[in-house]
């Protein structure tokens, strides 16, 4: 039904910009700057989705739904940290993480990896065969990302120190 396009140079640059925004998220310490990075990341992901499947209404609706949820989180977080100073933390470990992530992105862009296999599949085939051999690496990375996110959220919301502590 829908055919995914191969990666063009514009899409590669958009993906690279998206990964750079992901690293910028680590440098931000204020909740407002984090929300700005998340909203711009969402906008870029919707643009990538629009470039891949040529359905602008789908990416637009997805962006509006996600933006509604982000607005609720934005109001909650700004009420928690209303008078904090806005500053950027740059130390050696974050700079090394940024450089490592930059090299990873350049390596990923230079060599054709799993994304080209995904783009050769039809859209409906990709949806019906989520755990196929072509998508195995992407599924594994998604699982690892979700486990990592779970660990980070648990560490952030520890019972004694986190923002969700009991009163």
Image (cartoon, rainbow, N blue to C red):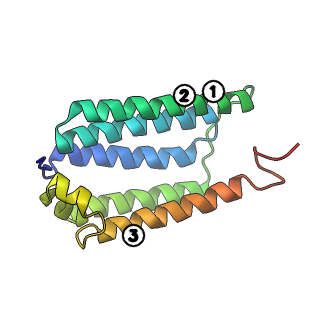
Query: Is residue 165 toward the left or the right of residue 113 in the image?
Result: right
Residue bearing mark 2: 71
Q: CA distance from mark 3 to mark 2?
A: 31 Å
Q: Residue at x 55, y 63 (%)?
A: 148
Q: Answer with left or right where residue 97 lies relative to residue 56.
A: right
Front one among 34 and 146: 146
Left or right side of 159 for 106: left
For residue 14, side relative to residue 143 (left or right): left
Q: Hey, which residue is sitting farthest front in the picture? A: 128
Are the residues tagged 1 and 2 within 8 Å (C-beta)? yes
User: Is residue 72 placed above or below 141 in the rendered structure?
Assistant: above
Q: Which residue carries the number 1 mark?
A: 75
First in sequence, mark 3 or 2: give its number. Answer: 2
Near-viewer residue (40 or 110): 40
In front here: 45 or 59?
Answer: 59
Residue 33 percent across, percent down from the top left:
56, 34
Q: Which residue is mark 3?
A: 140
- Give the alpha-carbon distance from disc 1 to disc 2, as whole Å: 6 Å
Taking the view exactly as shown, the residue that stands out farthest to the right is 167
Name the residue at the bottom extreme: 133
């Amino acid at each position: 039904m829908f055919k995914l396009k191969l990666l063009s140079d514009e899409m590669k640059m958009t993906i690279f910009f998206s990964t750079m925004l992901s690293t910028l998220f680590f440098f931000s310490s204020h909740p407002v700057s984090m929300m700005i990075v998340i909203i711009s990341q969402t906008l870029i992901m919707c643009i990538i989705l629009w470039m891949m499947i040529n359905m602008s209404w789908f990416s637009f609706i997805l962006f509006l739904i996600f933006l509604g949820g982000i607005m609720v989180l934005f109001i909650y977080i700004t009420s928690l940290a209303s008078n904090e100073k806005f500053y950027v933390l740059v130390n050696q470990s974050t700079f090394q993480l940024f450089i490592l992530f930059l090299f990873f992105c350049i390596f990923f862009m230079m060599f054709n990896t799993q994304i080209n296999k995904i783009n050769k599949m039809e859209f409906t085939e990709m949806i019906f065969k989520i755990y196929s051999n072509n998508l195995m690496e992407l599924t594994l990375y998604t699982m690892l990302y979700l486990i990592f996110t779970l660990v980070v959220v648990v560490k952030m919301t520890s019972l004694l120190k986190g923002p969700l502590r009991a009163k």
